[in-house]
């Protein structure tokens, strides 16, 4: 379709300013401006994915798949890759706000916006922008245009200048190029023109599924869900492993862990939650080992069992929610002794984070309320009065010499209950 109809940008004194039709009505996915079809789109930008060089297409395809999966119950959408961005056609029957919210939460997205456009001329760009810029209360504006791989007969600079002049005449707001109250974005890629004014931040990071798999030791508390989400944001899929001490504790930790796992699954779409009974191993530790070492021994047992389950699920590392010095088990000495029992690398995304920072992330993730609910965690069973804070490996290994560690590990891993979770 040829590019035609460049809008005149004569000074306002040469002709009276005309009013631009308000866009308070709901925009339709198929509309017409000057006889040409105008559609609604969701335009998605990424940042880190664009730095991947020769592997970039792999990451882009993963991002497209994840956007499709995140919105699969809303409509049959077909996101497509364009140079430097991803575009989703929004049919008139879909809830575009819900699609935007779902897609905008996908890891790997830097920002996203609802756009209008199509194969349009400059006259039509002016009309679309005019409708968008009429609504709302603001004083100053700017135009930001980008032209890529296109035969459009105007450069980005020309669009900035001429569309800015047209909006200045027709909308009646002041121009501020450094700190505008509102920005009108125009992106032209190939023969497609996209116009939008509201750009929202995404979570950033990398698409889930591009960085392997990790096994997360998931408690019902605040920290480990945040650690899991941080690894997902780096592109890793998470196998979720929760330890409970039933029947000596109630089922509250497992119930809370399931709720947390359901929230985390919204970020990776498929999860396996393993509910692992730790009580039999704890009973043997209590019977055979010094009281002050119990917590460290519990955690070493968890590392062994989690390593076995994670390896079976294809994971290449373990993840914990440890934060240095937060509790007695998280001193450097104890962390080193506990990690020694793992047979996979142990990653600690929160190790240098303050509790207030972790709580803030948990609120944003949506897990804080569940994580704050009272429950009986596994490690409180037969909890020592004075747990060791600087455990020595030789003392711990001497205590473990009284135990059949391999049998305890195999028994717990075999008794684990698997809960598959899906979203949406």
Image (cartoon, helix red, strand yellow):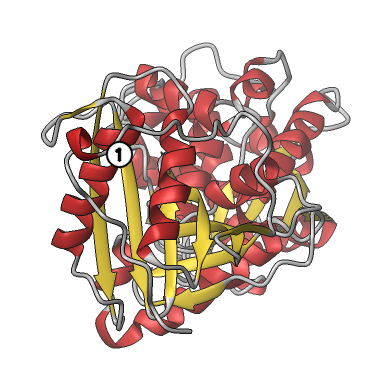
Give percent across and percent down for residue 69: 69, 63
The kind of secondary structure element at disc 1 is helix
- Is 145 left or right of 76, judged from the image as shown? left
Against 271, is 375 above or below? above
- Is 144 left or right of 253, judged from the image as shown? left
In the picture, residue 23 is in which quadrant?
A: top right
Against 61, is 339 above or below? above
Crowding around mark 1 (Cα neighbors within 10 Å: few <14, some 14 to 19, many 20+) is: many
Q: Who's the residue at 68% across and 37% down the image? A: 26
Q: Who's the residue at 37% across and 52% down the image? A: 110
- Is 187 left or right of 161, judged from the image as shown? right
**Between 380 and 89, which is closer to the camera in this rendering?**
89
According to the picture, the residue beneath numbered tag 1 turns out to be 167
In the picture as drawn, the residue positioned furthest to the bottom comes out as: 54
Give percent across and percent down for residue 56: 35, 80
Q: Who's the residue at 48% across and 54% down the image? A: 107
**Between 254 and 192, which is closer to the camera in this rendering?**
192
Give percent across and percent down for residue 153: 25, 76
Would you say residue 409 is visible in this rendering? no
Against 194, is 51 above or below? below
Would you say residue 278 is visible in this rendering? yes
Against 315, is 145 above or below? above
- Is 28 left or right of 176, judged from the image as shown? right
Q: Who's the residue at 36% across and 62% down the image? A: 122
């Amino acid at each position: 379709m040829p590019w035609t109809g460049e809008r005149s940008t004569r000074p306002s004194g040469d002709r009276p300013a005309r009013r631009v039709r308000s866009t308070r009505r709901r925009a339709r996915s198929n509309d017409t401006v000057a006889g040409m079809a105008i559609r609604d789109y969701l335009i998605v930008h990424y940042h880190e994915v664009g730095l991947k060089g020769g592997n970039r297409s792999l990451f882009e395809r993963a991002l497209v798949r994840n956007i499709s999966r995140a919105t699969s119950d809303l409509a049959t959408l077909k996101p497509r890759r364009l140079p430097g961005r991803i575009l989703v056609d929004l049919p008139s029957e879909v809830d575009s706000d819900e699609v935007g919210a779902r897609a905008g939460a996908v890891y790997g997205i830097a920002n996203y916006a609802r756009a209008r456009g199509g194969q349009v001329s400059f006259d039509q760009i002016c009309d679309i922008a005019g409708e968008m810029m009429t609504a709302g209360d603001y004083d100053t504006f700017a135009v930001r245009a980008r032209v890529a791989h296109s035969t459009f007969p105007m450069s980005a600079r020309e669009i900035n200048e001429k569309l800015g002049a047209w909006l200045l005449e027709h909308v009646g707001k002041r121009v501020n190029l450094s700190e505008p109250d509102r920005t009108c974005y125009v992106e032209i890629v190939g023969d497609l023109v996209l116009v939008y004014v509201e750009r929202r931040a995404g979570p950033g990071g990398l698409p889930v599924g591009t960085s392997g798999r990790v096994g997360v030791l998931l408690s019902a508390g605040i920290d480990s869900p945040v650690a899991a989400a941080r690894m997902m944001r780096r592109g890793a899929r998470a196998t979720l492993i929760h330890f409970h001490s039933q029947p000596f504790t109630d089922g509250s930790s497992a119930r809370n862990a399931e709720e947390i796992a359901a929230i985390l699954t919204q970020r990776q779409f498929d999860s396996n939650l393993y509910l692992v009974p730790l009580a039999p191993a704890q009973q043997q530790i209590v019977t055979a080992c010094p009281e002050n070492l119990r917590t460290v021994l519990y955690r070493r047992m968890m590392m062994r069992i989690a390593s076995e389950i994670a390896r079976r699920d294809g994971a290449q590392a373990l993840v914990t929610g440890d934060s240095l010095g937060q509790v007695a088990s998280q001193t450097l000495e104890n962390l080193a002794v506990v990690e020694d029992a793992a047979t996979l690398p142990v990653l600690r995304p929160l190790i240098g984070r303050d509790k207030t920072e972790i709580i803030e992330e948990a609120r944003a993730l949506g897990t804080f309320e569940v994580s704050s609910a009272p429950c009986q965690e596994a490690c409180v069973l037969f909890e020592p009065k004075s747990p060791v804070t600087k455990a020595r490996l030789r003392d711990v290994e001497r205590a473990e010499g009284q135990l059949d560690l391999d049998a305890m590990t195999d028994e717990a891993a075999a008794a684990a209950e698997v809960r598959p979770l899906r979203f949406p």
